[in-house]
């Protein structure tokens, strides 16, 4: 079992039992949206590499992250194929879009905000992997446990990059996005997705 203390201290709330119950009842949707999330995570890392070429450490970390996220995408696809889950097109969750709407527009502040947002997305993924590993059937438990450490490192990489590339302390921005993230996770949400709020 993984040590989730760092993740739980970073996030303002835990995943609700209502979301976990929905995940148990909608495992096909969970897997399809998980695949989408891995693709989007790789694309987000590559977008940062494209836009912010001045930072060698960012380029190195994002290149590794993008490769790992695409590997995770392949693993989800393999599991879906094994379980007979068709890869359908799903409307996205509100989660990442709402977080990114709060990013500042001027640079370098926008980069710092995008990195902090990346840290929250990865941290929530970690928290849900750990929760799901206790709640689902053995095959899915093992699958989500196998992804945990890589996603935790991604969370740490994003947060460390935000801190090292910012000319000012990032504590207030982390607190700002923590409150927004909590609101998205702890409020009613009409769509069930990997990063959705409380099912209604």
Image (cartoon, grey):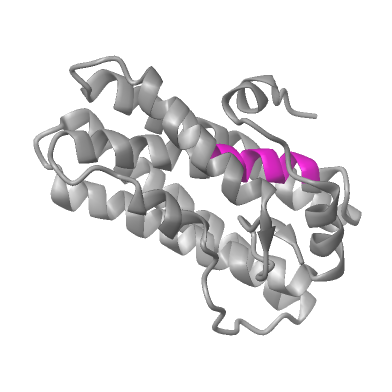
Q: Quadrant of the N terminus?
A: top right
Residue reaching furthest to the left: 54
- Is residue 144 depicted above or below 190 in this figure? above
- Is residue 118 depicted above or below 69 in this figure? above
Q: Who's the residue at 15% across and 43% down the image?
A: 52
Residue 118, image quadrant: top left
Residue placed most toward the observer, 153 or 122: 122
Q: Is residue 161 left or right of residue 79?
A: left
Q: Who's the residue at 69% across and 77% down the image?
A: 81
Residue stretch rendered in magenta on the structure = 122-131
Q: Could one spot residue 79 in this view of the protein? A: no
Q: Is residue 127 magenta?
A: yes
Q: Is residue 68 left or right of residue 62?
A: right
Q: Who's the residue at 74% across and 74% down the image?
A: 28
Residue placed most toward the observer, 89 or 183: 183
Residue 103, image quadrant: top left
Q: Residue 38 at x, y = what percent?
A: 50, 58
Q: Residue 133 at x, y = what percent?
A: 81, 45
Q: Who's the residue at 84% across and 54% down the image?
A: 18
Q: Is residue 25 left or right of residue 61?
A: right
Q: Residue 191 at x, y = what percent?
A: 65, 70
Q: Main secondary structure of the magenta part?
A: helix
The count of marks equals 0
Q: Is residue 145 magenta?
A: no
Q: Residue 96 at x, y = what percent?
A: 46, 55
């Amino acid at each position: 079992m993984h040590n989730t203390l760092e993740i739980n201290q970073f996030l303002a709330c835990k995943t609700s039992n209502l979301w976990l119950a929905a995940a148990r009842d909608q495992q096909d949707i969970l897997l399809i949206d998980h695949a989408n999330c891995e693709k989007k995570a790789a694309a987000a890392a590559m977008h940062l590499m494209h836009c912010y070429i001045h930072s060698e450490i960012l380029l190195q970390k994002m290149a590794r992250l993008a490769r790992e996220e695409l590997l995770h995408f392949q693993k989800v696809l393999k599991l879906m194929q094994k379980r007979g889950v068709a890869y359908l097109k799903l409307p996205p969750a509100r989660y990442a879009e709402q977080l990114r709407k709060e990013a500042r527009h001027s640079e370098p502040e926008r980069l710092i905000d995008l990195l902090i947002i990346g840290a929250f997305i990865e941290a929530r993924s970690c928290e849900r992997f750990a929760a799901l590993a206790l709640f689902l059937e053995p095959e899915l438990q093992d699958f989500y446990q196998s992804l945990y450490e890589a996603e935790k490192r991604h969370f740490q990489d994003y947060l460390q990059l935000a801190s090292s590339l910012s000319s000012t302390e990032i504590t207030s921005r982390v607190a700002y996005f923590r409150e927004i993230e909590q609101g998205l996770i702890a409020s009613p949400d009409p769509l069930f997705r990997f990063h959705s709020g409380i099912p209604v």
